[in-house]
Image (cartoon, rainbow, N blue to C red):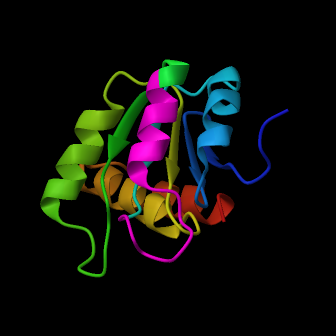
Amino acid sequence: MMNPKFNRLTDGFFASPQITADEVAPAVADGFDLIINNRPDGEEPGQPPAAEIAAAAAAAGIAYVDIPIGREGISHADLHAFDEAIAGRSKVLACCRTGTRSTTLRTFARAHAGDDVDRLISEAATGG
């Protein structure tokens, strides 16, 4: 059964609050083929470091990318990194503290690529 904190925006993209290393292998079992971490290290005490999640991803055989979105917000470089990361992927799990930055990054990147904005807003709203 899929982790209930993985919020579906589309069949191929889910946003989640912070995941732990223990949640990586079950995500692979759920069919995810990429994890994107949108949370900068050290944002709050007790948060798992990106290297820990990356190591769990490597051990589980899933691709992993860091695109940390901090207080400065989303840049054009972040949009480009996101597009490169998801190219050819079938089911992506992106995470941050609450899932909002991951949802926003995907929405901005897809809008920048020319996708229908009304549809993107609807997908983001559906995903929470």
Quarter in which the C terminus is drawn:
bottom right
Q: Quadrant location of residue 30?
A: top right
> Which residues lie in the magenta part?
40-58
Is 53 a magenta residue?
yes
Residue at (22, 56) in percent of width and height: 78
The total of numbered circles placed on residues is: 0
Q: Nearer the viewer, residue 34 or 44?
A: 44
Residue at (23, 35) in percent of width and height: 84
Percent x, y for residue 6? 68, 49
Percent x, y for residue 38? 39, 58
Left or right: residue 102 versus residue 14 is left
Residue 23 visible (yes or no): yes
Quarter in which the N terminus is drawn:
top right
Residue at (35, 34) in percent of width and height: 86
Residue 34 visible (yes or no): no
Above or below 101: residue 77: above
Above or below 64: residue 120: below
Is 51 a magenta residue?
yes
Left or right: residue 12 versus residue 29 is left
Residue at (41, 51) in percent of width and height: 50
Percent x, y for residue 16? 61, 55
Above or below 116: residue 61: above
Q: Residue furthest left?
A: 77
Q: Residue furthest top?
A: 61
Q: Nearer the viewer, residue 64 or 33?
A: 64
Q: Residue furthest bottom?
A: 71
Left or right: residue 56 versus residue 89 is right
Percent x, y for residue 33? 50, 24
